[in-house]
Amino acid sequence: MSDASSPASTARNIMALVTDSWSTNADRVVMRYTDPADDWIDVTGRQAREHVDAVAKGLIARGIGPGDTVGIMCRTRFEWTVLDLALWSAGAIPVPVYDTSSSSQIDWITSDANITTLFVETEAHAELARKVASDTESPLTAIEVIDKGALDALKAEGASVTDAELEARRTAAGPEDLATIIYTSGTTGRPKGVRLTHGNYTVHVAGIHEELRDVLFEDGASTVMFLTLAHSLARLVEVALVASGTVMGFCPDPAKLVPYMGTFKPTLILAVPRVFEKVYTAAEQKAAAGGKVKIFRWAAKQAIDYSKALDTPQGPSTALTLRHRIAHRLVLHKIVNVLGGNGHWAISGSAPLGERLGHFYRGLGLVVLEGYGLTETNAASHVNRPSRSKIGTVGKPLPGIEVKIADDGEILLRGPSLFAGYHHNPEATAASSHDGWFMTGDIGVEDEDGYLTITGRKKELIVTAGGKNVAPAMLEDRLRAYPLVSQCVVVGDGKPFIAALITLDAEALPGWLRAKGLPEMTVAEASKDATVREHLDRAVERTNKAVSRAESIRKYEVVLDDFTIANGYLTPSLKVVRSRVIADFHERIEDLYASGPTS
C-alpha cells in the first residue's frame, strides 16, 4: 500500500483559489482566446475577474441562488470558463453537459440534477434542449444560447447587483459544499452523476501545485486547452491552471489545434494519447511523401534510444548523443515546431500512451507526464513527476491519495479529493466502496517505488474457454499504436482463442499507402488488399510479443466503419463502448470463430 500526506489548503472554496491568483496576476495575461480571424486576444487577471464578476451579478439578478444546479453545454471556449467561474461566484452548482449529447442524454442529466436553466453554445443545441423542455415532467424552463449573446445579456442585467452582495455569495460555500456534478461518459450503462465538493478541488489543486510546480509555475507557463471541459480531467485542469496563473488558451475546434499550437507556442501540451499518435503519424507520412521516410524512422529510433538510455546508470553514450543531435537537427526539430516550438512538458491521460511514444517524445525534449484517474477521483489520482518520470507507468499517487492493490489486482483508493458519492444513487455509492476504499474497477501493479502500471479493466477481463484470464486493454493499446489502426476491440470471452475487431484510420490511410508505394484505395478496398493485410498481420504479431500464446490475438476482422462519438461507439472522452460494439457486431464476432484461428 502506498500513500501520500494531504497538502494543507487554506482556500475555503474554489473561487478563493481563483481570486487569489487573479489578484497576484492582475496585470499579467492569464487567458487567451481567438477572434474570427484566429488572432489571439489576451485577458489579464484583472480583466478575467471583471468578466466573471459581471456575469455572476447577472446570474444573481436572474434569480439563480445558492445551491441551484445550472447546466453548461458548450465546446471548450473562453465563455465556458467564464460561465463556470461565474456560477461558482454566485453560489450555484455548474453541471457540464457534453456538447455532443443527444436529447435523451440532455433529458437524463437535466432531470437527474434538477436543472432549470441550461446554457448552450448554439441554436442547434438549443433545439435539442427545447425538445426536452417541452416534456411537462422536465424541470428545464430556461435555455440560454451563448452564440446569441446570453453572457452579454447577463452582464447588462447584473448592473444593479452590488459588489458586497456578490462577495457574500462568492465566499459562502465551504469545503463540504457541493461544487459540481459531473456525469460519467457512460461506457457501462446510464451515466452516473459524480458529486464533487469545493474541498475535493481545493485540496487536490494544492497537491497538484505542490507536485507539478516546475510545470505550472515556471516563467511563461502556458497551454492550449482543447479537451472538452465537460470531462472531469479538463475541468480539474481548468481550476488548477487558473489558480496557478498558467496562461490558458482556448481551442474550441480540435481541427485547428496544430495551427493554434504554432501561434500560441505552449510550454505544456495537455492531450490524450490519440493526439500524440496522430502527430507522430502525420510527421511520418509527410516524410514519406517527400521520399524521406527512411531518415524519419532513423531519427525516431535515435530519439527513442536516447530516451531509453537516460534511464540507465551510465546514460547515453557519446556516439548516441551525437546521433541524437544530428537527428534533432535534421528531423526532430520539425515535430517540436509543429507543437509550437516551446513545449517541454506534456500531460497525457484517459488511456495508456505506450512506452514507444513516451520515449519518442522525451527524445524530442518533451517530457510526457502520464497520469491516471477517474471522475470519482476528481480526474487524477496518479501522475509522473517532473523530477522523475517512469515511462510506461502512470506515476505515483498525488498528495492525500492512499493506494492499495486488492488480492485480485483491483486498484483501491481513498483520500480527501475523492468524490462525495453518486447523485440520487445511494445504491451505486454503497457498491463503489469496501471498508472505506473506493473500488476503481481497474487492475494494476505497483513497483517498489510506488509507481503504478495499469494492466486492464476488471469488468473487461476475458476468460477464454480454456480458462485463461486475458486483459484486453494491453493488446488493444499496442495494436492501436500502429499508424493504420484507428480502433481495436479484443474479444474471446468463453471462446477457444482471442480475436479482435479493428477499424482503419481513414485520415492516415492515404499517406500510409503512398509511403508503401501503393495506389489510392478506399477503406473497404484497403481492408481486402493483400499488402495491407500483410502489414496488419505484422502489427498483430508485434502486439502478440507482449503476451503469452494463450493471450495472443489469433484472428482479426476489419470493420469498415470507424468507431466514433457520432455513431455511439466512442464516449465523448474517446473510450470505446465495448458492450455496444460486442452487441452490435455479434454476428461478425461469431463468424471469427466459425473456423479455427489463422495463426
Image (tube, grey):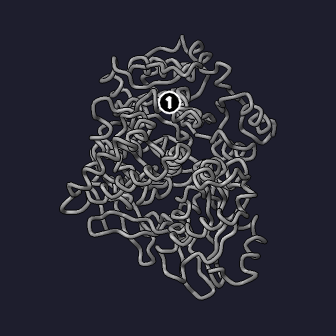
- The answer to which image quadrant residue 453 occupies is bottom left
Q: Residue at x 55, y 36 (%)?
A: 94
Q: Position of residue 516 (x, y in %)?
A: 59, 55
Numbered-mark total: 1
Q: Is residue 184 visible?
A: no
Q: Nearer the viewer, residue 562 or 135?
A: 562
Which of the image's four quarters has the C terminus?
A: bottom right
Q: Is residue 421 left or right of residue 559?
A: left
Q: Position of residue 154 (x, y in %)?
A: 59, 18
- From this view, report whether residue 83 is shown above or below residue 419: above
Q: Residue at x 27, y 44 (%)?
A: 210
Q: Is residue 500 visible?
A: yes
Q: Is residue 363 left or right of residue 282?
A: left
- Residue at the disc numbered 1: 260
Dot 1 falls on a residue whose secondary structure is: helix
Q: Position of residue 2 (x, y in %)?
A: 30, 65
- The answer to which image quadrant residue 318 occupies is bottom left
Q: Nearer the viewer, residue 597 or 88?
A: 597
Q: Residue at x 31, y 40 (%)?
A: 215
Q: Nearer the viewer, residue 546 or 345?
A: 546
